[in-house]
Image (spheres, rainbow, N blue to C red):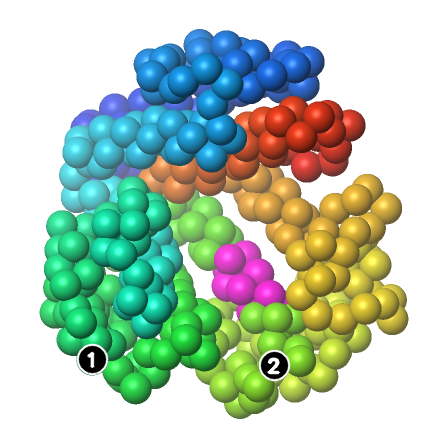
């Protein structure tokens, strides 16, 4: 029954994605990369995996241009899969692009507020979040016009309606806007994978429920930690939490009432993974509070809370490939490739700065 609605074409696509998964860099590849002395050496080591995408780069390219080209390869592979997807998989892949669209729209809102150059803004947008009418947003001369354009011209319109007005679109609220859109998006995606007649009760709904519940919890924890020392009220903070996840509802209620990191630690104590993360980073102790310790504070292995969240995301993504007949392998493959690009960028930056000793702690190999 698991494969009842998984048609032949989508079965072919799953095979393609599993092939992409097998082409990810191996431990030996990373070993070779850590021996590189220059960015040109890095490019040479990456040639078998990224081929023509790196060929056009100038000698000793910047780390940002190297990251851009490796991202181009991911986008091209994603678009190939998307162009061949049918039925529920086609819609599933649309959902995967919405998160990038939210980031792009937030970038355009910020740019409009600061009267930035339109072309510069479009160049900085993530290609997986590109939609046909995106240039229309840049024509807006004020925030109200931009808001109306978003409601009419973008796939994100349902996530704006009833949640945000054009009065909300100001610099102070930009992160509130982004998190509100993500909350609405995650809730919609979660509902869809658990209610769609082709997906309900299948491995896709099981794996993606775990994926999305983890993402909902991660965002709730990060929103809480980032809110300390800001003007965001507890009531407004609570509105940004997705209404599902392993922490929901008791844990998120406790998060909404937390006044400090100790309050956050108590709120997540019932979920073993998150409790372990706080223990490993020292956040379970009476250390410094706020974003610094969340993103940059380190535990015994030099890893921050955000590093451990990424590590958990990679574990979930790897496990997705142990299941058959599931759209979740597409999601998992994208996340693994994004981590690979982060790894490449980090290694390149360490080499460029002649600080190769820093490489090891931040590499996730899968």
User: Is 40 in front, or is 70?
Assistant: 40
Q: Could you say where residue 204 lies in the image, as x and y percent from the top left?
A: 38, 45
Identify whether 108 is placed above or below 90. Answer: below
User: Is 222 in front, or is 316?
Assistant: 222
Left or right: 136 in relation to 353: left
Element under disc 1: helix
Q: Could you say where residue 327 lies in the image, as x and y percent from the top left?
A: 34, 40
Q: Residue at image x 13%, y 50%?
A: 132
Left or right: 221 in relation to 160: right
Q: Could you say where residue 135 lies in the image, as x and y percent from the top left?
A: 16, 55
Q: Quadrant of residue 348?
A: top right
Q: Residue at image x 43%, y 50%?
A: 208
Q: Which residues are magenta?
A: 213-222
Q: Could you say where residue 17 lies in the image, as x and y percent from the top left?
A: 35, 27
Element under disc 2: loop
Q: Which mark is residue 230?
A: 2
Q: Residue at image x 55%, y 84%?
A: 232
Per the picture, the main secondary structure of the magenta-coloured stretch is: helix
Classed neighbour count for the residue bearing mark 2: other residues with Cα under 10 Å, few (<14), some (14–19), many (≥20)? few
Left or right: 326 in relation to 135: right
Classed neighbour count for the residue bearing mark 1: other residues with Cα under 10 Å, few (<14), some (14–19), many (≥20)? some
Q: Magenta segment: does it hold 94? A: no
């Amino acid at each position: 029954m698991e494969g009842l609605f998984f048609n032949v074409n989508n079965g072919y696509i799953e095979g393609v994605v599993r092939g992409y998964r097998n082409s990810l860099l191996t431990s030996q590849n990373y070993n070779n990369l850590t021996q590189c002395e220059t960015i040109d050496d890095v490019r040479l080591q990456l040639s078998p995996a990224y081929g023509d995408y790196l060929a056009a780069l100038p000698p000793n390219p910047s780390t940002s241009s190297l990251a851009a080209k490796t991202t181009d390869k991911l986008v091209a592979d994603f678009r190939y899969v998307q162009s061949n997807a049918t039925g529920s998989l086609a819609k599933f892949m649309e959902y995967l692009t919405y998160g990038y669209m939210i980031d792009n729209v937030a970038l355009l809102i910020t740019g409009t507020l600061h009267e930035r150059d339109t072309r510069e803004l479009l160049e900085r947008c993530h290609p997986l979040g590109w939609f046909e009418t995106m240039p229309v947003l840049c024509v807006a001369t004020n925030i109200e016009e931009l808001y109306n354009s978003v409601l009419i011209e973008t796939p994100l319109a349902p996530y704006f309606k009833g949640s945000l007005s054009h009065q909300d679109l100001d610099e102070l609220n930009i992160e509130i806007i982004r998190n509100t859109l993500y909350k609405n998006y995650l809730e919609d995606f979660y509902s869809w994978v658990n209610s769609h007649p082709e997906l309900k009760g299948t491995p896709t709904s099981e794996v993606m429920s775990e994926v999305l519940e983890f993402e909902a919890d991660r965002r709730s924890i990060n929103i809480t930690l980032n809110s300390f020392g800001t003007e965001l009220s507890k009531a407004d903070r609570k509105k940004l939490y997705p209404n599902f996840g392993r922490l929901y509802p008791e844990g998120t209620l406790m998060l909404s009432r937390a006044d400090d990191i100790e309050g956050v630690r108590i709120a997540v104590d019932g979920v073993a993974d998150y409790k372990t993360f706080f223990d490993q980073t020292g956040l379970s102790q009476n250390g410094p509070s706020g974003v610094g310790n969340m993103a940059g504070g380190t535990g015994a292995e030099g890893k921050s809370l955000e590093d451990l969240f990424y590590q958990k995301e990679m574990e979930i993504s790897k496990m997705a490939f142990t299941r058959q007949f599931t759209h979740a392998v597409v999601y998992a493959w994208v996340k693994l490739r994004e981590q690979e690009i982060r790894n490449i960028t980090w290694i390149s930056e360490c080499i460029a700065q002649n600080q190769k000793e820093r490489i090891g702690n931040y590499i996730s190999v899968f």
